[in-house]
Image (spheres, grey):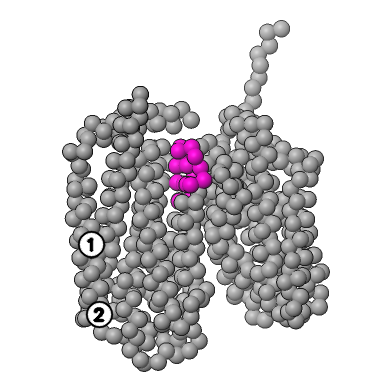
Amino acid sequence: MARSVQVKTPSTFTEYKILLGKDLRREFRTKEMLTSMGIYSILVLVVYGAALSQSSQGVDVLQMSGGLLWALIVFTSLLGLNRSFEHEKENGCLDGLLLVPMDRSVIFLAKATSNLLFMLVVEVIAVPLYFFFFLTGAPVSDSWPLLVWPLIVGTIGMAGIGTLLSTITVNTRGKDVMLAVLFIPLIFPLLYACVSAATVVLVGGDWQTTYLTSLALAGGYDVIMLLLSWVLYGYVISA
Amino acid sequence: MAQTNKNRRGQMPSRGQTASRGQTALSTADKIAPVILVLGAILSVLGFVLAFTIAPPVNGARVDGIAIIGDQMVGNQMLFSQKIFYFHMPVAITSFLALGVAAFYEIRYLMTKDSDYDLKAHLATEVSLVFVVMVMFSGEMWERFEWGVWWTWDPRLTTYFILMLLVIGYFVLRAAVDDPEKRASYASVFGIITFIDVPICFMITRLVPSSVHPTIFRTDSGLSTEMMIPLMCAMFGMLFISYGLFRWRLRTERAQEELDRMKQTLDE
């Protein structure tokens, strides 16, 4: 019975798939993140309802829509990112992950992807709801479907930086506040670009130049930040 | 992380070395630091005085050909508040440089895991915070008296404001982590990411020409010699002050470290 044991090192992509699958499976079983983020986003919309109740509906709200939409996304993402590493601390799950001889950046990519997916799912719910509540009577420009691109580019960047920062803050005191303190200033350029891109496609008019410049800015910021987070992640998670 | 452990052990002799040298032997940098600090103070004061004596008053904000500010033409009155510029810009450049030095030490820390680099990065960021606050303060005065507003979301103002928040965030982060090694790693990583904002802030007046800040830092800055002299005095003065402050703080911190170690030895 002396059969030699065959040990096959899984490829990096397999490791990535397994780690991502773990996060998604956990979410499908508990539905913890999606419900909390979804409900929170609806609550923010309710607050908007009160905040905007005195403005003349339509044009006023349309001008602010890009900003309001992104405020909603930022706060909802903060909630989700805060929790994304919480359950990894339970039962020493993170220590187990670190024992596996694999590149640390795979953990970053898997975690960022799962955060990105959760944030996108919440946006798919929250953005139509925003339209339903505030923009049904407004003269929205025909170019509104292009809103998708700033949403995707912005969410990618936020998921990337957010994953790095939430790995840091999960080990600090007062972690909920700490993530906001570090996260919001850091994503500000991205937020600024995405808000301007979202606003011009909603309002319409001469939007092409502003839209493309803003998207290029946001995309460039994404690339820089994702690369940097990817490189620095190993130092953070094994600290 | 065998490498980390090796380096952590490796750092001990360097600390011991400092201890054995004791108080009597100061490094050259520590010796010249007070001199540089005093020199910096003299130069800054000189620049300040010259800004009021030899630098000519400026028409409106026409330093660099920008005439429209806040949607209105600035009149030809001589603007006294422009004198803030001779203080404002050197301090801003110094804060960028200090953050650059901090980023350098942060990268060195992540490469070597030597806690001395972390200390240096921490102190450089501390010095930069002082300068960042001074920039915000002088900028705020300028804004009020020259543009007539308390705050505007001008691209450079915005990016600099974020920079201030990030530098403050660096210290909030340090205060929230107890384990020294974790604190050093987290702070270094965050400091490196923070540094991304520095080139953005520096370049933004070139990228977004609508900015109310003129582009000063270039070969043909449009400044006359009488304006350049006080500016350069203040610039080098501020750079010297920042270096002096940094070395001084470093000396204090090292003395504190040594004192703690002595106390520990006595307790044992």
Please tell me which residue is depicted at 29% across the width and 30% down the height of the picture.
B16
Is residue B176 part of the magenta span, yes or no? yes
Q: Position of residue A207 (x, y in %)?
A: 64, 77
Q: Secondary structure at mark 1?
A: helix
How many marks on residues?
A: 2
Is residue B73 part of the magenta span, yes or no? no
Q: Magenta segment range?
A: B174-191
> Can you say whether B19 is above or below B232 in the image?
above
Residue under pointer 2 = B52
Please tell me which residue is depicted at 69% across the width and 36% down the height of the picture.
A18
Q: Quadrant of residue B56?
A: bottom left
User: Dot 1: within a 10 Å radius of its alpha carbon, few (fewer than 14), some, or many (20 or more) residues?
Assistant: many
Whether residue A46 is visible to the viewer of this picture, yes or no, is yes
Which chain does tag 1 point to? B
On screen, residue A215 versus residue B138, left or right, reads right
Q: Position of residue A104 (x, y in %)?
A: 56, 38
> Can you say whether B117 is above or below B206 in the image?
above
Please tell me which residue is depicted at 34% across the width and 80% down the height of the picture.
B82
Mark 2 and mark 1 lie on one chain; the one further toward the N terminus is 1
On screen, residue B31 versus residue B213, left or right, reads left
Which chain does tag 2 point to? B
Give, as a three-letter code, the residue at label 2: Phe
Give, as a three-letter code, the residue at label 1: Gly
Using the image, tell me which numbered label, if any, was put on residue A13.
Answer: none
Q: Position of residue B229 (x, y in %)?
A: 22, 74
Please tell me which residue is depicted at 56% across the width and 44% down the height of the picture.
A173
Q: Quadrant of the N terminus of chain A?
A: top right
Residue under pointer 1 = B40
User: Dot 2: within a 10 Å radius of its alpha carbon, few (fewer than 14), some, or many (20 or more) residues?
Assistant: some
Q: Position of residue A203 (x, y in %)?
A: 69, 77
> Can you say whether B212 is above or below B161 in the image?
below
Q: Secondary structure at mark 2?
A: helix
